[in-house]
Image: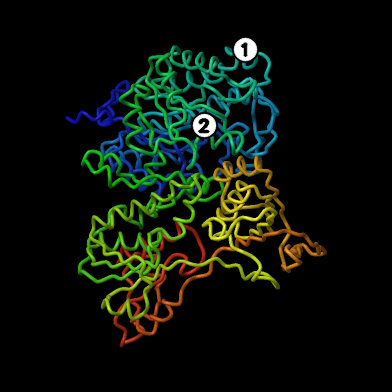
Amino acid sequence: MSNDPLLQPYQLKHLTLRNRIIVTAHEPAYPEDGMPKERYRAYTVERAKGGVAMTMTAGSAAVSKDSPPVFNNLLAYKDEIVPWIREMTDAVHEEGAAIMIQLTHLGRRTRWDKGEWLPVVAPSHHREASHRAFPKKIEDWDIERIIKDFADAAERMKAGGMDGVELEAYGHLLDQFASPLTNELDGPYGGSLDNRMRFCFDVLKAIRARVGDDFILGVRYTADECLPGGTGKEEGLEISKRLKESGLIDYLNVIRGHIDTDAGLTDVIPIQGMANSPHLDFAGEIRAATNFPTFHAAKIPDVATARHAIASGKVDMVGMTRAHMTDPHIVRKIIEKREDDIRPCVGANYCLDRIYQGGAAYCIHNAATGRELTMPHTIAKADRRKKVVIVGAGPAGLEAARVAAERGHEVVVFEAANDPGGQIRLTAQSERRREMISIIDWRMSQCEKLGVTFHFNSWAEADTVQAENPDVVIIATGGLPHTEVLSKGNELVVSSWDIISGDVKPGTNVLIFDDAGDHAGLQAAEFIAKAGGKVEIMTPDRSFAPEVMAMNLVPYMRSLQKLDVTFTVTYRLEAVEKSGNELVAHVGSDYGGIAKQRTFDQIVINHGTIPLDDLYFELKPASSNLGEVSHDQLIAGRPQTAWRNADGKFQLFRIGDAVAARNTHAAIYDALRLVKDI
C-alpha cells in the first residue's frame, strides 16, 4: 500500500472511503427539468472513474417549492427525482466511489419571481444583496412545513441510493436562522444561540428519524461569518461543538465567510490572484477543537497543498472541487505517479461565474468537462497517422497540437513570436492573472512529451506550410486589436493591448472606451491607474465589463475603486480629434439626444479583435475542402469529409480568434472537437 497521505483510506462511520480526496457539493447547472439526467450522470461518473473517494453532487438541491433555484439546480422536492438519483448512484458505486448530495432551503437567497412565484421566506425582512428579494418573515407553519420538506427530501435521496446527505447551511436558510444578523424572530427560534440553532437541530432530528443511523449526515456551515454583528469565531466554535455533541451528524464541513454579496462569495471561494487555501488553517482549528471528522474545500487546486492538509491533520477529507472540473483524473494520475500530467486549475472561475449568470459550468481550459457525452477526457488513437501543420501557438493552436499528437499524428507548429501563448501571455502580464499562463505551460509540456515539433520566430507563409506536405492544416493565428471604431480620429487612439504589453506608455488623464466588456479593458485601466494616471472607463452598455462576470469582477473593483477610477455607463465615444497636446473626445449615446466634448491626453479603445486570417485565405484555394467545416459532422463527432476541390492536397481549417473574437474556452473547444476526429 502507498504511504502517500492522500491515498490512505478513511472510515466515516460505516462507510470506507478509498482515499482522502473528495469533490465537495457543487451544482454545475446540468439538470434537465430539475433532474440529474444523462449529461449530469456522465459528468459525475467521470470523477468517480478518475479515482476520487467521494463525490458530492448538487450545490444545493432544493427541498421546498418556495426555495426555487436561481440557476439550474436539482429539485429534491419532486418524487420523480428518485429513479434518476438511483441511476447516478449505481453508476458511481460501480466505479468504487461513494456519493452524497447536498440539500438546502435557500431562504432569502433566491427570488420570488422564480419557480412558482411564491414569497421568499427568512427569519427577518432583510434583503440579501445578491438576489435582491425582500423576504416574508417566516411563520410557525412555514417552519413546520420546511422541516418536513427536509426530511422528505432526505428520504428520497436514501431511496435513490445515496450514501448520505449534507445540509447546506452557510448563507442559506439554516444559517439565516443561526446568524444574529439575519434572525429577528422572537420565541423559540430567535434570540439566544440555543434558539437560533433550534431550527437546524429540528431539521437534523427530522431527517435522522426518517433515514436511520446507517446513513451519513453532515453539515456545511460557516464557523465565522467575518461580518460585524454576525456569527464570530468564538460563537462559530460553540456551534461546531454543539453540532458534534448533538449525535445527529457524522462530520463537519467548515467554511469561513459570508456569501450575501459578490465580494463575500469571492472571499469564500477565491479566484486566481487570491491566496490558495485561505481557510485551511481555520478548518484545522475547528478540527483540533472538536476532534470530530472535518472536511474542507476552498481553492485547494494542487496536490501538494491537499497532501499537506491531510498529512498535517488539519482535515480528514480534502475537497478539490474546481480542480476536478479541470482534471477529473487527479487521483488516478497520483496513483500512477503522473502528477506532472495533471491539468492545472488556474482559478479563472469561468465555471462558477457562468452558472451565476444562468449558464452551465464549463472549465476555461478543459472543454470536455460538462460535455462528457460528446467530448473525451482521454484522446483515442487515430486509425491512420497524418501530418498536421498548425500555425499559431496560442491556446487554440496548442490544444490542436496536443490533441493531434495524442491521436498519433505527426505535428508541426509554426509561431511568429518568441514564445507560445498568444493572448494568454498578454493576459498573464497582470500579476493577479498570472496563473493563466499554466494553460499554456501544461500544453507545452504535454506537446513536448508527445513529440510535437515547434518553430518559433517563424512567420509562416503559404509556401512554408505547403513545403511540409501536410494532410491537414489548422490556422490558429488569433486576432489583432480592433480599434477602427470611430467616425473620425482612429489614428489618434491606442489599444488596450498596447497598454498591457507596455508598448505604449500610460497617459496621465486617460479615457478607456470599452465596448468589448472583457478583461482587457479593466486590465488596461489597472495598469494606467497604478502608474499614476487618472482613468475613466466608458461603455455604451448598461453595465461595464459584462464579459468579466461577477466573481472575477470583485478583485478588479477592489483595486480600481482604491485607485479612484471612474466608471461611466450608457455613453458612446463617437470621434476623437487633436487639439494641441490634448485629445478631444466626442461623446454621444445610443439613447439619443446627447453630444458632449471631453478632453484627455490619451484615449484607449477596447473593442475585441479582428481575425488575423490572411494566411487562411492564401491557402484556401489549395485545400481539398476550401476551408469548409460541416457543422453537422462537427456536432455529431464525425470526421470532416467535405471535398470541394479535386486538386486540393490538404484539409484546411481555422479555429479560435482566427475565426472571430471569442474567448479562451471557445478557442480550446474549437480545437478539441475538431481535432479529436482527425
Q: Say which amino acid is labelled 1.
A: Ser
Query: How far from the left and from the top, in percent, is residue 24?
Result: 41, 34
Q: Nearer the viewer, residue 469 or 162?
A: 469
Circle 2 residue: 104
**Closer to the N terminus: mark 2 or mark 1?**
2
Q: Quadrant of the N terminus?
A: top left
User: For this rendering, which residue is in front, 70 or 530?
Assistant: 530
From the image, which quarter does the C terminus lie in?
Answer: bottom left
In this picture, is 56 found above or below 621?
above
Q: Secondary structure at mark 2?
A: strand
Vertical comparison of 270 with 389: above or below: above
Q: Position of residue 230 (x, y in %)?
A: 61, 22
Which of the 4 image quadrants contains residue 217?
top left
Query: Residue 160's x, y, as percent?
Result: 38, 35
Residue at image location 57% in from the left, 57% down from the top? 499
Q: How many marks?
A: 2
Q: Amino acid at mark 2?
A: Thr
